[in-house]
Image: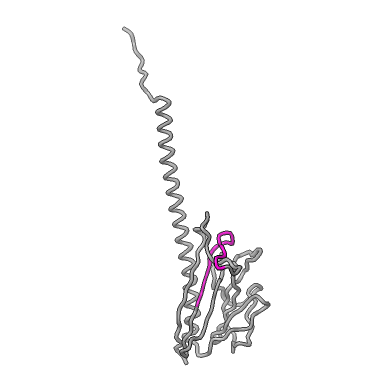
Amino acid sequence: MSMHRSNDGFTIIELLVATAVFSTILLLISVGIIQVGKMFYKGVTITATSETARVILEDVSQAIQFNADSVEPVIAENGNSQGFCVGSRRYSYVLHRQLANTPVDEQVSNALVVDSVASCNSLTPAQDVIADPEGRELLGLHMRLANLEVQPLSTEGLYSISLTVIYGDDDLLVDRTGDGNLDSCETITGSEFCSVAELDTIVQKRIQ
């Protein structure tokens, strides 16, 4: 009685097709995971930037609302820092400089600092925030202040506040306004680590 060995099995073509299909599925899954990761980090970046801007706006707004003194700009310091007084609260800041723990190039260790100064007025100098200022830093790491304006309106006791906070390294930003300052996020790889928060409000002084 003769025995016949079965030759059933996968051919090389079938193995190649199966490998190609598996590789395609694996690639699609990997791309999906990467996209989800980017969306997650983009959300975290936007939330952190927006929350920081909101806290700064609220800090300045409350200082204006509950302070009996006027809002006055202060003397710029060393051609870098500028600022304003709201009663005894002095806000000193430098624009378009990224906050970092160990600053290099155009980075700074302080960018927006608030402290208390008795009889703060238009003759009070802003702190040199690039040096070692006293007070509380309001920005977070990797952020920069692009704009902070407090302007009195025609109605007495009303002030407008405009604020722009940017999160991101220089290579993720671009100058879209043409003023020589990085002010917008570039659409490139890594843009999930870049965000711009612009806030405006009008505040009514409650104490006259």
- Locate residue 25, reporting x and y percent: 41, 41
Q: Is residue 5 left or right of residue 27?
A: left
Quadrant of the rendering where the N terminus is positioned: top left
- Locate residue 50, reporting x and y percent: 47, 69
Residue 68 forms part of the magenta stretch: no
- Locate residue 97, reporting x and y percent: 60, 68
Query: Most extreme residue toward the bottom, as rendered?
Result: 208
Q: Is residue 32 left or right of residue 152?
A: left
For the point 47% across and 59% down, the residue is: 42
For the point 63% across and 64% down, the residue is: 102
Name the foreground residue: 183 vs 73: 183
Name the foreground residue: 202 vs 4: 202
For the point 45% across and 65% down, the residue is: 47
Highlighted range, magenta? 162-177
Color style of the picture: one colour
Task: Reply above or below: 61 against 22.
Answer: below
Residue 168 forms part of the magenta stretch: yes
Task: Reply above or below: 136 against 172.
Answer: below
Name the foreground residue: 40 vs 199: 199
For the point 61% across and 84% down, the residue is: 74
